[in-house]
Amino acid sequence: MTPVYRAPMRARDREVLGADHGLAGGIVGIGDALSRVPASLDAAVTAAAAEHGPKAGRMLQAFAELPDDTFVWTRASDGSYHLGRICGRWRYVDSPVGIVHVRPAKWLERPFGEDLVPAAVAHTFARGGRNLQRIRDERAERLTAELWG
Protein backbone atom coordinates (compact mmCIF):
# COMPACT_ATOMS: atom_id res chain seq x y z
CA MET A 1 0.00 0.00 0.00
CA THR A 2 1.04 3.59 -0.55
CA PRO A 3 1.99 5.40 2.66
CA VAL A 4 -0.36 8.10 3.95
CA TYR A 5 0.88 11.23 5.75
CA ARG A 6 -0.70 14.03 7.71
CA ALA A 7 0.67 17.36 6.46
CA PRO A 8 -0.58 20.20 8.65
CA MET A 9 1.62 22.74 6.81
CA ARG A 10 2.09 24.97 9.83
CA ALA A 11 5.41 26.62 10.49
CA ARG A 12 6.58 26.28 14.07
CA ASP A 13 7.42 29.97 14.28
CA ARG A 14 4.03 31.27 13.09
CA GLU A 15 0.37 30.83 13.91
CA VAL A 16 -0.57 31.09 10.22
CA LEU A 17 -1.98 27.97 8.62
CA GLY A 18 -0.03 27.29 5.44
CA ALA A 19 -2.39 24.64 4.08
CA ASP A 20 -4.40 27.19 2.09
CA HIS A 21 -1.13 28.45 0.58
CA GLY A 22 -0.02 24.90 -0.27
CA LEU A 23 -3.35 23.97 -1.83
CA ALA A 24 -3.39 27.12 -3.97
CA GLY A 25 0.24 26.65 -5.03
CA GLY A 26 0.17 22.92 -5.70
CA ILE A 27 2.74 22.13 -3.02
CA VAL A 28 3.10 20.27 0.24
CA GLY A 29 5.73 21.36 2.70
CA ILE A 30 7.22 21.85 6.12
CA GLY A 31 8.68 24.84 7.92
CA ASP A 32 11.92 25.59 9.76
CA ALA A 33 13.22 28.50 7.71
CA LEU A 34 16.99 28.72 7.39
CA SER A 35 19.20 31.78 7.81
CA ARG A 36 20.55 31.27 4.27
CA VAL A 37 19.00 29.77 1.18
CA PRO A 38 20.64 26.34 0.84
CA ALA A 39 22.33 25.34 -2.40
CA SER A 40 21.26 21.70 -2.11
CA LEU A 41 19.24 19.28 -0.03
CA ASP A 42 22.39 18.14 1.78
CA ALA A 43 23.17 21.76 2.69
CA ALA A 44 19.58 22.27 3.85
CA VAL A 45 19.64 19.16 6.06
CA THR A 46 22.96 20.22 7.60
CA ALA A 47 21.69 23.78 8.19
CA ALA A 48 18.35 22.58 9.61
CA ALA A 49 20.17 20.34 12.09
CA ALA A 50 22.53 23.14 13.10
CA GLU A 51 19.86 25.84 13.39
CA HIS A 52 16.86 23.87 14.66
CA GLY A 53 18.32 20.68 16.12
CA PRO A 54 19.09 17.18 14.85
CA LYS A 55 15.41 16.20 14.71
CA ALA A 56 14.71 19.02 12.23
CA GLY A 57 17.49 17.73 9.99
CA ARG A 58 16.14 14.18 10.15
CA MET A 59 12.59 15.32 9.45
CA LEU A 60 13.70 17.32 6.43
CA GLN A 61 15.68 14.39 5.04
CA ALA A 62 12.72 12.05 5.53
CA PHE A 63 10.33 14.51 3.86
CA ALA A 64 12.63 14.94 0.87
CA GLU A 65 13.01 11.16 0.48
CA LEU A 66 9.30 10.34 0.43
CA PRO A 67 8.54 8.61 -2.85
CA ASP A 68 6.49 10.32 -5.51
CA ASP A 69 2.81 9.33 -5.30
CA THR A 70 2.89 9.29 -1.48
CA PHE A 71 -0.55 10.36 -0.24
CA VAL A 72 -0.82 13.46 1.92
CA TRP A 73 -3.78 14.88 3.80
CA THR A 74 -3.99 18.47 4.93
CA ARG A 75 -6.66 20.61 6.53
CA ALA A 76 -7.59 24.04 5.19
CA SER A 77 -8.48 27.06 7.31
CA ASP A 78 -12.20 26.35 6.80
CA GLY A 79 -11.74 22.92 8.43
CA SER A 80 -12.09 20.90 5.23
CA TYR A 81 -9.70 18.04 4.54
CA HIS A 82 -7.78 17.81 1.28
CA LEU A 83 -6.12 14.79 -0.28
CA GLY A 84 -3.04 15.04 -2.44
CA ARG A 85 -0.06 13.13 -3.78
CA ILE A 86 3.55 14.17 -3.83
CA CYS A 87 4.77 14.53 -7.42
CA GLY A 88 8.23 16.01 -7.50
CA ARG A 89 11.50 16.84 -5.80
CA TRP A 90 12.30 18.95 -2.75
CA ARG A 91 13.12 22.62 -3.10
CA TYR A 92 13.57 25.57 -0.76
CA VAL A 93 11.31 28.57 -1.33
CA ASP A 94 10.75 31.94 0.28
CA SER A 95 7.26 31.72 1.72
CA PRO A 96 5.03 34.28 3.44
CA VAL A 97 3.54 31.49 5.57
CA GLY A 98 6.83 29.90 6.65
CA ILE A 99 6.44 26.68 4.65
CA VAL A 100 9.89 26.74 3.02
CA HIS A 101 10.79 23.10 2.34
CA VAL A 102 8.33 22.09 -0.35
CA ARG A 103 7.55 19.46 -2.94
CA PRO A 104 5.05 19.64 -5.77
CA ALA A 105 1.72 17.98 -5.02
CA LYS A 106 -1.40 17.13 -6.98
CA TRP A 107 -4.44 17.98 -4.86
CA LEU A 108 -7.92 16.70 -5.54
CA GLU A 109 -10.24 19.62 -6.21
CA ARG A 110 -12.87 18.09 -3.97
CA PRO A 111 -12.63 18.87 -0.24
CA PHE A 112 -13.74 16.28 2.30
CA GLY A 113 -15.69 16.73 5.50
CA GLU A 114 -14.64 14.94 8.67
CA ASP A 115 -17.35 12.33 8.11
CA LEU A 116 -15.72 11.20 4.84
CA VAL A 117 -12.04 11.00 5.77
CA PRO A 118 -10.57 7.84 7.26
CA ALA A 119 -10.97 7.89 11.04
CA ALA A 120 -7.20 7.64 11.60
CA VAL A 121 -6.68 10.77 9.48
CA ALA A 122 -9.21 12.79 11.49
CA HIS A 123 -7.69 11.45 14.72
CA THR A 124 -4.15 12.59 13.85
CA PHE A 125 -5.38 16.09 13.04
CA ALA A 126 -7.44 16.20 16.25
CA ARG A 127 -4.28 15.50 18.26
CA GLY A 128 -2.75 18.68 16.86
CA GLY A 129 0.89 19.26 16.18
CA ARG A 130 2.77 20.90 13.37
CA ASN A 131 4.87 18.03 12.06
CA LEU A 132 4.49 15.91 8.99
CA GLN A 133 3.45 12.52 10.35
CA ARG A 134 2.89 9.08 8.83
CA ILE A 135 -0.53 7.62 9.51
CA ARG A 136 0.17 3.96 10.18
CA ASP A 137 -3.24 2.45 9.70
CA GLU A 138 -4.03 -0.10 6.96
CA ARG A 139 -7.67 0.93 6.79
CA ALA A 140 -6.70 4.60 6.36
CA GLU A 141 -4.30 3.62 3.58
CA ARG A 142 -6.96 1.58 1.81
CA LEU A 143 -9.70 4.22 2.19
CA THR A 144 -7.35 7.00 1.10
CA ALA A 145 -6.52 5.09 -2.09
CA GLU A 146 -10.24 4.55 -2.72
CA LEU A 147 -11.01 8.24 -2.23
CA TRP A 148 -8.24 9.12 -4.67
CA GLY A 149 -10.15 6.98 -7.14
Image: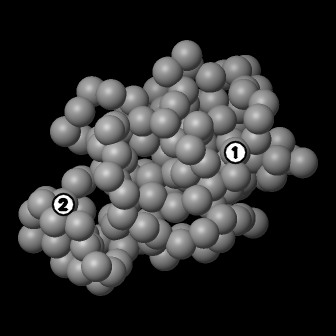
Residue at the image point whose x is 9% and y is 70% from the top:
50
* Residue 8 image label: none
Q: What element carries label 2?
A: loop
Q: Compared with residue 67, is residue 136 higher up or lower down, i.e. above or below? A: above
Q: Quadrant of the rendered structure where residue 110 is? A: top right
Residue at the image point whose x is 33% and y is 80% from the top:
40
Q: Is mark 1 on a helix, strand or loop?
A: strand
Q: Disc 1 to disc 2, how far (Cα)?
A: 27 Å
Of residues 131 and 45, the one drawn nearer to the viewer in this rendering? 45
* Kind of residue sitting beneath label 2: Leu
Q: Compared with residue 64, is residue 18 higher up or lower down, i.e. above or below? A: above
Of labels 1 and 2, earlier in sequence is: 2
Residue at the image point whose x is 52% and y is 31% from the top:
20
Q: Compared with residue 137, is residue 70 higher up or lower down, i.e. above or below? A: below
Bin the neighbour count of mark 1 within 10 Å (Cα to Cα): few under 14, some 14-19, many 20 and up: many
Q: Quadrant of the rendered structure where residue 92 is? A: bottom left
Left or right: where does residue 65 sit relative to residue 58? right
The reply to whether residue 51 is visible in this rendering is yes
Q: Quadrant of the rendered structure where residue 143 is? A: top right
Of residues 92 and 74, the one drawn nearer to the viewer in this rendering? 92
Residue 24 image position (x, y, % from top left): 59, 37
* Kind of residue sitting beneath label 1: Trp
Return the residue at label 1: 107
Residue 139 image position (x, y, % from top left): 74, 48
Bin the neighbour count of mark 2 within 10 Å (Cα to Cα): few under 14, some 14-19, many 20 and up: some
| Pointer 1 with pointer 2, Cβ within 8 A | no
Return the residue at label 2: 34
Left or right: where does residue 41 sit relative to residue 20? left
Residue 41 image position (x, y, % from top left): 34, 78
Left or right: where does residue 126 sit relative to residue 4? left
